[in-house]
Image (cartoon, helix red, strand yellow):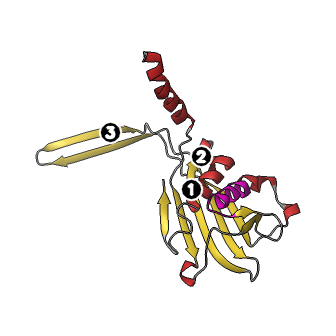
Amino acid sequence: MNTRNRLLPLLSLALLSACVVPTGPVEVTRFNRASEGVVYGTGSVSVVLAGETDQGQSLAASPYLAAVARELQRVGYSEKNADSDIVAEIRYGVVTLERERRSPVSVGVGGSTGSFGSGLGVGVGINLGGGASAQVETTLAVRLLRRSDKLVIWEGKASQIAKVGSPAAQPGIAAAKLAEAMFKGFPGVSGETIRVP
């Protein structure tokens, strides 16, 4: 086996790892009715933006709707737009968190006098961290309602914080990460809050 053939798998892995976008941990809280005998992952589902009709769904919501639909299919539901067994209502929010700006340079002066003499000291501190930058908190909330009696059978909320302008703050990437974390181990332990890296 020549060297080129041995290096090809390593090169492929390196290229794949370069495509991974680093995102911060996601905090997820879920509630379910598994203890009441509700069965999850079967039947049909339609995914809608809470409070809007199908015709009124905004383009900004499309990454979140698509991400939730993808995860629901992964856990066993089939997608059906009309007369589905389950309706998945989603809400999402994006908030910019401004941090307090501090000067990158600080100067401290101190002095003392006493029986052993006196002294004066000056200290200069330089913050090499580049200063604080704004962050974006993205949240996704999903409720699964049984269409027959409008009973909420499952609900979850996921949130993550990312630096403004980073790939993790982009709607498509954030929506996919939040939905994936929310439906990990579906339906999850009711009332438990977890952090998904």
**Which residue is located at x 82 percent, y 60 percent?**
57
Callout 1 secondary element: strand
**Quadrant the N terminus occupies:** top left
In the image, residue 169 lies at what x, y percent? 62, 47
Pointers 2 and 1 in contact (CB under 8 A)? yes
Q: List the residue tagged with mark 2.
A: 168
Task: Say which of marks 3 and 2 sits in front.
Answer: 2
Marks 1 and 3 sit apart, C-alpha to C-alpha, by 38 Å
Q: Is residue 40 above or below residue 56?
A: below
In the image, what residue type sits under mark 3? Answer: Gly
**Which residue is located at x 47 percent, y 39 percent?**
104
Callout 3 secondary element: strand
Q: Residue furthest right?
A: 55
Q: In the rendered picture of this protein, how many numbered marks are placed on residues? A: 3
Marks 2 and 1 sit apart, C-alpha to C-alpha, by 9 Å
In the image, residue 185 lies at what x, y percent? 52, 63
Q: Quadrant for residue 137, please give it.
A: bottom right
Earlier in the chain: of badge 1 and badge 3, it is 3
Marks 3 and 2 sit apart, C-alpha to C-alpha, by 39 Å
Q: Which mark is residue 123?
A: 3
Label 1 neighbour load within 10 Å: few <14, some 14-19, many 20+ = many
In the image, residue 117 lies at what x, y percent? 14, 43
Q: Which mark is residue 179?
A: none
Q: Which mark is residue 160?
A: 1
In the image, what residue type sits under mark 2? Answer: Ala
Earlier in the chain: of badge 3 and badge 2, it is 3
- Residue 69 falls inside the magenta stretch: yes
Magenta-tinted stretch: 64-77
